[in-house]
Image (cartoon, grey):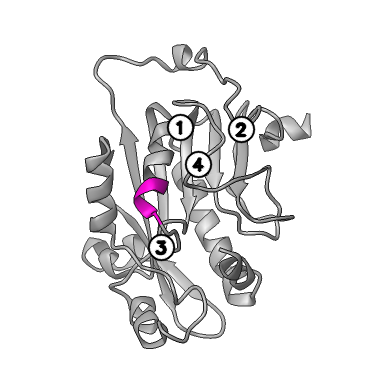
Amino acid sequence: MHSLHTWFASTAGQELAEREVRLLNRRLAGLYATRVLQVGAYGAGHCPAVFGRARQWIVDDWRQGPVDLQGAPEALPFANESVDVVILIHQLEFADRPHQVMREAVRVLAPEGHLLVLSFNPYSLWGLRRLLAFKHGQPPWTGRYLSALRLADWMLVLGLTPRSPDALALLLRQRVRAMPYNQSLGPVLRWVGGVNLVIGQKRVPGPTHPSLRRLRKLELSPRGWIEAGARHSREEIKQ
């Protein structure tokens, strides 16, 4: 993932990070999220906003990077069912074991929680660019891109209920130009966006009231206290 971190430091990478963060902010605003785990760091201070009493952690295997916890996405240092939202930032395309990354995300996700997966779309201009440069290219062109349909299938296998995907339409220039397909070109062209955001919810039988979910334990995991290093919401920082 080090090479992807380097690309996110470029002009095109920073512009893509900004647009992805805006999309994540819109989706997080409609979710119950007091504990948010972001797997994968953009760098340069880019991360989704959390509000109220929410806590946020950024986990990445990026040494000396802008993270709260250093760790591999295949073995997250969190207890079972301990976070409300897990966000995977282009982890599956570049992981040696993408299925294990997904399983770990579901493991730490609380009942009725949401998994948000950002992934480059193979059925897009970016996917075509990847095919042309796969053998000799650099990230982001070296990943194994996953379609929204495949991501939804993986979520179903793991017991999540996927929603209709969001997509960003990205123009291949030195500077990234983007617009959300689902707001401008309709649901058909949504499937060919350069970046997909697929959301799945961890449904469980019976009611799970949010007030009771706040009482669930946030325990010492085998890898250390996960409460340490938590980012406060923007509202609490201002107080």
Lower position in the chain sequence, tag 1 or tag 4: 4
Q: Is residue 198 magenta?
A: no
Side (left or right) of 107 relative to 59: left
Q: Label 3, on which residue?
A: 93
Looking at the image, residue 176 lies above or below residue 29:
below
224 and 23: which is toward the camera: 224
Q: In which quarter of the image is the C terminus?
A: top right
Q: How many labels does the image show?
A: 4
Quadrant in which residue 31 is drawn: top left
Q: Which of marks 2 and 3 is in front?
A: 2
Crowding around mark 1 (Cα neighbors within 10 Å: few <14, some 14 to 19, many 20+) is: many
Q: Which of marks 3 and 4 is in front?
A: 4
Whether the residues at callouts 1 and 3 have beta carbons within 8 Å, the answer is: no
| Alpha carbons under labels 1 and 3: distance apart | 20 Å
**Circle 3 sits in a helix, a strand or a loop, which is it?**
loop
Does label 2 or label 3 sit earlier along the sequence? 3
Where is mark 2, residue-wise? 223
Depth check: 44 or 93 in front?
A: 93
Q: Where is residue 112 in the image (x, y as percent from the top left)?
A: 36, 27
Which residue: 56% across, 80% down?
175
Magenta-drawn stretch, dominant element (helix, strand or loop) = helix
Q: Do the residues labelled 4 and 2 touch (CB within 8 Å)?
A: yes
* Label 3 crowd bin: few (<14), some (14–19), many (20+), radius 10 Å: some
Looking at the image, the residue that sits furthest to the right is 239
Q: Distance between the residues labelled 2 and 3?
A: 25 Å
Which label was assigned to residue 108? Answer: 1
Mark yes or no: residue 205 visible: yes
